[in-house]
Amino acid sequence: MENKKIKDIISEIGKMNILEISELVKALEDEFGVKASSQVQVVSAPNGDNNSAQQDGSQSQEAKDSFDVILESAGDKKIEVIKAIRSINPELGLKEAKDITEATPKALKESVNKEEADKIKKLFEEVGAKITLK
């Protein structure tokens, strides 16, 4: 990095705790009208043979096997549900996780495979939350 301002900003962010970073992200989103996203799309290069057609077929197959995990109700143990929300979405702060428990029904994860959706559902049902998979 050439720019000293950028180096200084990164250095300051490195000194912050996760709650402060979460608040910073929220403030930047509000200030500039953007939304930070932690989703990363992985793209693989074709091997020279006709793998791209096979990959497209497997991606459409995955779409059929993907589920949205919806929190229908937090139940009586809201603190445990908030902890569970933060365990599957570590980028969320306490306030954001609490807001999700109060704004049900709310999507917790979108387009996840069946195995991950079942794992998340089990985690939340163990703490008394009601989950649906769509």
Image (cartoon, rainbow, N blue to C red):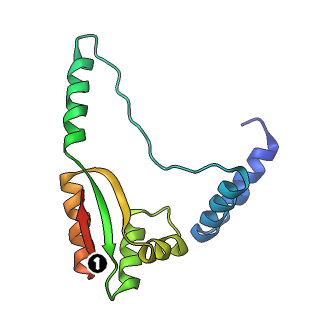
Image quarter where the C terminus lies is bottom left
| Rendering coords of residue 33 (x, y %) | 67, 50
**Which image quarter holds the N terminus?**
top right
Q: Position of residue 58 (x, y in %)?
A: 20, 31
User: Which residue appears at 19% of the width and 61% of the height?
Assistant: 118
Q: Secondary structure at mark 1?
A: loop
Residue furthest out toward the bottom: 76
Q: Taking 79 as reference, is 57 left or right? A: left
Which residue appears at 42% of the width and 76% of the height?
Answer: 101
Say whether residue 109 is left or right of residue 34.
Answer: left
x, y percent for residue 82: 41, 77
Q: Amino acid at mark 1?
A: Ala
Whole-percent x and y of residue 84? 36, 73
Q: Which of the pair 48/56 is nearer the observer?
A: 56
**61 to 30, vertically: above or below:** above
- The residue under the point 57% across, 67% down is 18
Q: Which residue is mark 1?
A: 129
Residue 26, quarter of the rendered image: bottom right
Number of residues whose C-alpha sits closer than 10 Å to that of mark 1, classed few (under 14), some (14–19) or many (20 or more): many
Q: How many marks?
A: 1
83 above or below 56? below
Query: Position of 26 compared to 60: left or right?
Result: right
Q: Residue furthest top?
A: 48
Quadrant of residue 2 in the image? top right
Q: Identify the residue at image location x=19%, y=45%.
A: 65
